[in-house]
Image: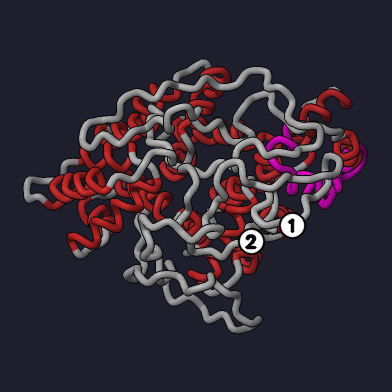
């Protein structure tokens, strides 16, 4: 899926993207927006303007009991971002939700067993960007929802009873299912699922499956699985059966942190008794398989790794020689650089490449690569240069043209909804690029309870 919009360029307006008055959204003239990506790669935003907030600086999610909606606060975990869309993202690739937030009611329960932290070995050849955090710092932990057994403290009995009542007896109360399940963060969801099983002796997901249907059912079950469970389910679907579901595979593997990838690999092994790396290698072909093996190694430079100008220059030279040196395309070198550098390093590389060679690195990839390899490399690069706009583009891709890709739409909406700050940024990017609200677009493409569920998730 190559992006075929008009030439990109132009930074976002000063002060962020403002919402135009109602009724003044001109229809988009192209499937993809003007002004993407912003011309600010490699530059740190002003203090207080970066997304997501530096780790450890999210506000507490709530001071009340389990299930209480967090108060809106700047950068608050579970609340909408209060900074304007447009600043280059500064958090880790795949943007964890800020790490374990402080102040959760009752604190986190001790995880039953966390995924092992793979050691960060020497990076691949070419410039030796350090992949380990600074001396004395631990690698970033998995995102909330990626440690099996980890859950919020507090009491979820009231919500469990509401869900039981919504499905017990004749008929199903779909409104209650949406209200309860769409507003939980990953750790609250884990507590609710555990509480429901303990109180009623049955699996919440199994009961939902028997009481609902179609994409509404799939969306509810995706919420109940949580981010790790849904990633494992989706990556299995992507590589099993006839042909590879490339978009689904890209969404999971190419948009996660090192720690989250390690958690996915471990949970896949536990669930299916198979090596995910081996399964992907056997499902893909040649150089594309090589790229995914580089990513699955989970050796990407962390965001704590410095951006060293001399290393950036060498990467720019290596990429130019690999793609435009007149000796054919060196796919391995291109894949190695894009799969091993941090977001900050890739932003600097993209900016330096355009400054030196007068063309965007993105355009070079579109010219020199095709098919799944092109889509995968663009997914990585755009995730580093402007993750919110990339995800807005991915949402639009599920709705443009004849027919809506409902399965991909629900998976992307639910994935982004786990991080409320990022969801607010995606909505701002969508508004900027397409001159309309994301909610309005979803209303035009979906119906019934499925529509209501998606709208609740993006609120």
Secondary structure category for the residue under label 2: loop
* Residue 129 percent coordinates (x, y): 30, 36
Question: Horizontal placement of 125 versus 118: left or right?
Answer: left
State which tag comes first along the sequence, 2 or 1: 1
Q: Which mark is residue 82?
A: 2
Q: Is residue 185 magenta?
A: yes
Q: Which mark is residue 160?
A: none
Q: Is residue 205 magenta?
A: no
Q: Which residue lies at the image location 31% right of the left edge and 32% below the top edge?
A: 289
Q: Which residue lies at the image location 24% right of the left edge and 43% below the top edge?
A: 311
Please state which of residues 64 and 54 is positioned toward the viewer in this rendering: 54
When asked about the image quadrant of residue 141, the answer is: top right
Overall secondary structure of the magenta stretch? helix
When asked about the image quadrant of residue 133, the answer is: top left
* Residue 102 percent coordinates (x, y): 70, 38
Secondary structure category for the residue under label 1: loop
Callout 2 environment at 10 Å: few (<14), some (14 to 19), or many (20+)?
some
Q: Is residue 30 visible?
A: yes
Q: Is residue 236 visible?
A: no
Q: Which residue lies at the image location 56% right of the left edge and 58% below the top edge?
A: 48
Tell me: residue 49, above or below residue 130.
below
* Residue 407 percent coordinates (x, y): 57, 47
Q: Which residue lies at the image location 76% right of the left edge and 44% below the top edge?
A: 181
Q: What residue is disc 1 on?
A: 72
Callout 1 environment at 10 Å: few (<14), some (14 to 19), or many (20+)?
some
The span shown in magenta is 166-190
User: Furthest residue to the left?
Assistant: 326
Question: Horizontal placement of 296 versus 457: left or right?
Answer: left
* Residue 229 percent coordinates (x, y): 61, 31
Marks 2/1 in contact by CB < 8 Å: the verdict is yes
Tell me: residue 94, above or below residue 32.
above
Please state which of residues 417 and 288 is positioned toward the viewer in this rendering: 417
């Amino acid at each position: 899926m190559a992006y075929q919009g008009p030439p990109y360029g132009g930074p976002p307006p000063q002060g962020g993207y403002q919402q135009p008055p109602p009724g003044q959204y001109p229809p988009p003239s192209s499937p993809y927006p003007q002004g993407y990506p912003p011309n600010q790669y490699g530059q740190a935003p002003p203090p207080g303007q970066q997304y997501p907030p530096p780790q450890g600086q999210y506000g507490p999610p709530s001071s009340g009991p389990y299930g209480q909606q967090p108060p809106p606060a700047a950068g608050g975990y579970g609340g909408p971002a209060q900074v304007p869309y447009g600043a280059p993202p500064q958090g880790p690739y795949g943007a964890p939700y800020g790490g374990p937030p402080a102040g959760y009611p009752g604190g986190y329960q001790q995880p039953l067993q966390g995924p092992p932290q793979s050691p960060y070995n020497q990076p691949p050849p070419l410039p030796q960007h350090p992949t380990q955090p600074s001396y004395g710092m631990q690698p970033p932990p998995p995102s909330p929802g990626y440690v099996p057994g980890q859950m919020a403290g507090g009491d979820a009995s009231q919500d469990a009873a509401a869900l039981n009542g919504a499905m017990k007896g004749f008929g199903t109360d779909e409104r209650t299912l949406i209200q309860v399940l769409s507003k939980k963060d990953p750790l609250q969801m884990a507590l609710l699922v555990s509480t429901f099983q303990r109180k009623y002796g049955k699996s919440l997901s199994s009961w939902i499956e028997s009481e609902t249907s179609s994409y509404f059912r799939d969306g509810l079950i995706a919420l109940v699985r949580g981010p790790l469970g849904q990633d494992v389910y989706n990556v299995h679907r992507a590589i099993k059966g006839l042909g590879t579901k490339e978009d689904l595979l890209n969404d999971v593997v190419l948009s996660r942190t090192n720690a989250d990838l390690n958690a996915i690999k471990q949970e896949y092994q536990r669930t299916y008794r198979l090596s995910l790396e081996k399964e992907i290698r056997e499902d893909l072909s040649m150089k594309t398989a090589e790229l995914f093996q580089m990513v699955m190694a989970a050796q990407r430079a962390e965001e704590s790794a410095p951006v060293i100008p001399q290393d950036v220059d060498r990467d720019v030279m290596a990429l130019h020689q690999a793609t435009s040196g007149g000796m054919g395309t060196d796919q391995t070198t291109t894949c190695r650089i894009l799969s091993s550098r941090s977001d900050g390093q890739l932003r600097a590389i993209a900016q330096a490449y355009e400054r030196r060679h007068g063309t965007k690195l993105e355009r070079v990839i579109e010219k020199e690569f095709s098919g799944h390899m092109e889509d995968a490399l663009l997914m990585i690069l755009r995730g580093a240069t402007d993750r919110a706009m990339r995800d807005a583009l991915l949402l639009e891709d599920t709705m443009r043209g004849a027919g809506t890709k409902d399965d991909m739409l629900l998976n992307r909406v639910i994935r982004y909804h786990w991080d409320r700050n990022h969801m607010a940024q995606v909505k701002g990017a969508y508004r900027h690029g397409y001159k309309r609200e994301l909610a309005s677009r979803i209303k035009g493409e979906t119906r019934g309870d499925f529509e209501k569920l998606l709208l609740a998730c993006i609120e």
